[in-house]
């Protein structure tokens, strides 16, 4: 079974992002970039499926600038077999990304496509769902357990107040939640080996996909700074402040 995993290059989760002075976006100059954490979980799940003998080949795909090759090499070091970069320096919205992924799905014909549930930069949580609509494949989102059984994949989903298990006919799309697995670290020998694994570079034009955006970012703002807290001396003072200052009781 071929598994396709979509990985996005994003600002590392440890970085405190700074908004550009003109509020047009986030400042990416000299900022550490990494693989989106939910995509790391997606790669890990594919590697575990291969280790179990369920997956025969893992192809990782990223859409983004030339530098996204770094995240693809990381995925190759973690156990993916080959990589595809759809190179674009434009800021692409989710629908454009989903259309490009659909073109890669058509080309690669995977039985299972694994994506993160969300990219931590744009917080869209919609690419997997859009890819589901474009391909017509069954989808199991927010997966905390994935079991392939014959021509089906059982996905346990994290939903409000509990878990839901759905059976999807293959080919299918799965998006990963936080508790699906704990990704491994790449070992040094595997990082070295990954340099020799195949990495194909394509363009949206070559895939015949128009990427013009239908969404324009008007303004990006940092959250308002929190005002400092105070210490009160008694319960009476606390109640008084909650009533008259905070006006919450
Ligand atoms: P989003 O819908 O933007 O929150 O992203 C959800 C998931 O879609 C990510 O975790 C990735 O698996 C995939 N994805 C989004 N953007 C890209 C991209 N530029 N390249 C590859 N995969 C992407």
Image (cartoon, rainbow, N blue to C red):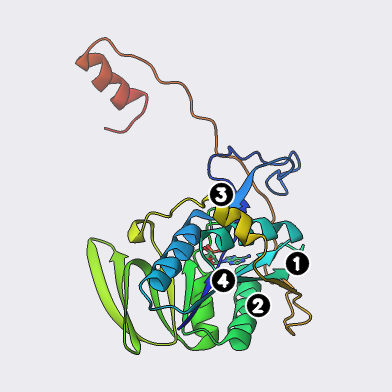
Q: Secondary structure at mark 1?
A: loop
Q: Position of residue 96 (x, y in %)?
A: 66, 74
Residue at 56% across, 49% down: 188
Please rate how many residues cluster around mark 3, counting C-alpha atoms within 10 Å: few if below 14, some from 14 to 19, many from 20.
few
Q: Position of residue 71 (x, y in %)?
A: 62, 57
User: Which residue carries the number 3 mark?
Assistant: 188
Marks 3 and 2 close (CB-CB < 8 Å): no
Marks 3 and 4 close (CB-CB < 8 Å): no
Q: Secondary structure at mark 3?
A: helix
Distance between mark 3 and mark 2 Cα atoms: 32 Å
Marks 1 and 4 close (CB-CB < 8 Å): no
Distance between mark 3 and mark 1 Cα atoms: 30 Å
Residue 150 to residue 19: above or below: below
Q: Position of residue 199 (x, y in %)?
A: 68, 69
User: Which-is-in-front pick, marks 3 and 1?
Assistant: 3
Q: What's the mark number on residue 100?
A: 2
Mark 3 or mark 2: name the one nearer the start of the chain: 2
Residue sitting nearer the eye, 203 or 246: 203
User: Which-is-in-front pick, marks 2 and 4?
Assistant: 4
Q: What's the mark number on residue 81?
A: 4
Marks 1 and 2 close (CB-CB < 8 Å): yes
Residue sitting nearer the eye, 197 or 27: 197
Distance between mark 1 and mark 4 Cα atoms: 23 Å
Marks 3 and 1 close (CB-CB < 8 Å): no
Residue 200 to residue 221: above or below: below
């Amino acid at each position: 079974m071929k598994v396709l995993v979509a990985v996005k290059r994003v600002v590392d989760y440890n970085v405190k992002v700074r908004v550009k002075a003109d509020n047009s976006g986030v400042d990416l100059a000299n900022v550490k970039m990494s693989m989106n954490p939910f995509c790391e979980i997606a790669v890990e799940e594919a590697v575990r499926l291969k280790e179990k003998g369920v997956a025969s080949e893992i192809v990782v795909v990223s859409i983004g600038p030339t530098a996204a090759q770094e995240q693809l090499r990381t995925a190759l070091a973690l156990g993916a077999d080959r990589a595809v970069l759809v190179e674009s320096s434009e800021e692409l919205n989710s629908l454009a990304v989903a259309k490009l992924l659909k073109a890669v799905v058509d080309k690669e014909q995977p039985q299972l496509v694994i994506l993160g549930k969300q990219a931590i930069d744009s917080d869209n949580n919609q690419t997997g769902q859009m890819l589901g609509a474009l391909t017509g494949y069954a989808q199991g989102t927010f997966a905390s357990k994935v079991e392939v059984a014959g021509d089906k994949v059982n996905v346990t989903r994290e939903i409000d107040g509990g878990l839901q298990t759905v059976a999807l006919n293959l080919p299918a799309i799965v998006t990963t939640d936080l508790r699906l697995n704990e990704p491994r670290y790449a070992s040094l020998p595997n990082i070295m080996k990954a340099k020799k694994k195949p990495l194909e570079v394509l363009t949206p034009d070559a895939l015949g996909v128009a990427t013009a955006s239908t969404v324009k970012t008007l303004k990006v703002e940092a959250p308002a700074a929190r005002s400092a807290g105070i210490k009160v001396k008694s319960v009476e003072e606390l109640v008084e402040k909650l009533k008259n200052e905070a006006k919450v009781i």
